[in-house]
Amino acid sequence: MQNTLRIATRRSRLALWQAEHVAARLRDAHHGLTVELLPMVTEGDRILDRALAEVGGKGLFIKELEVAMFEGRAELAVHSMKDVPAELPAGMVLACVLERADPHDAFVSNRFKRLDELPQGARIGTSSLRRQCQLLHARPDFRILPLRGNVETRLRKLDEDGYDAIILAAAGLQRLGLDARIASLVPTTASLPAVGQGIIGIECRADDTRTCKAVAALEHAPSRVCLEAERAFAARLQGSCQSPVAGFAELSGDRLSLRGLVGAPDGSEVFADLIEGKPGEAAGLGDTLAGRLLAAGAGPLLEALRAAAGH
């Protein structure tokens, strides 16, 4: 194995925490290995005045990291898997999936303890169409306000700008030691998580067998199974960044369950279903569940959303 590995990472505190976490795990797994960080500012970090859905979606956070690997400036990139598009670029591979952290959305508020305590017309900050869709489907009276920036920026906006609550990924807050800001976890029945939420993945060049072998030491097989089911579901849907999509798999013994959801951004339409099977069928289950939702009416909805987005 080469003695040095370089990790391409965004500069946000959460991204750096995740990269440092992976670096420490790799050093523990391979005696004498040097791991360095290559912090970068991505397009997604630069554009903060518009919703992600308007400017190209989550892939904006990882494109520069992939370029760094293609150009040989880094051997691997560490991602929050909920930020990774369903299809990786040719020549790239998801070489390692770490054990999933808390997959829930977190309800963060200075005045209320739970989502169901919010008054009529409450103002909720989120830039996630998935969260917006599910919130408005349950409570059309909610006022959803845009909320971009890193975790600390979002928390500051809650404190300064008078939101009644904001919704963030619980795993990100917990990784930054900000558990105390979580008023409560939102049940997955009220807000189905994003595909890959809570999972850290390591991306490498497919032809870089040495790096792929090195990072494989951190692999968590059960989390990989759940992620495969969720990403197959998302890939079949081919949703654009304008499409609210949620997918969450759970593994219990030899039974894999996957819940999926597709909806309209305003919550007026929601299609949801559940499928169960064996872990070895993960990708097939995801594909089948997506097919069911498309047939149930999600197909025309997604077509309309793609047309409205100009895709």
Image (cartoon, grey):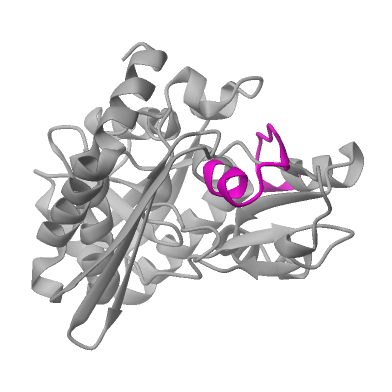
Q: Position of residue 243 (x, y in %)?
A: 40, 33
Q: Position of residue 177 (x, y in %)?
A: 69, 67
Q: Is residue 113 visible?
A: yes
Tell whether 138 sits left or right of 20: right
On screen, residue 91 above or below 191: above
Which residue is at a point 55% across and 63% down the rendered structure image? 171
Q: Can residue 31 be seen in this view?
A: no
* In magenta segment, residue 49: no
Q: Quadrant of the N terminus?
A: bottom left
Q: Where is residue 48 in the image (x, y as percent from the top left)?
A: 64, 24
The one of 222 and 214 positioned closer to us in this rendering? 222
- Give the residue furthest to the top: 310
On screen, residue 132 above or below 108: above
Which residue is at a point 42% across and 61% down the rendered structure image? 23
Q: Position of residue 216 (x, y in %)?
A: 21, 66
On screen, residue 306 above or below 33: above
Which residue is at a point 13% across and 36% down the rendered structure image? 91
| Magenta part of the chain | 133-152
Q: In which quarter of the image is the C terminus?
A: top left
On screen, residue 219 above or below 36: below
Which residue is at a point 23% across and 88% down the rendered structure image? 253
Quarter-wise, where is residue 3 in the image? Answer: bottom left
- Give the residue furthest to the bottom: 253
Tell whether 84 sits left or right of 125: left
**Total marks placed:** 0
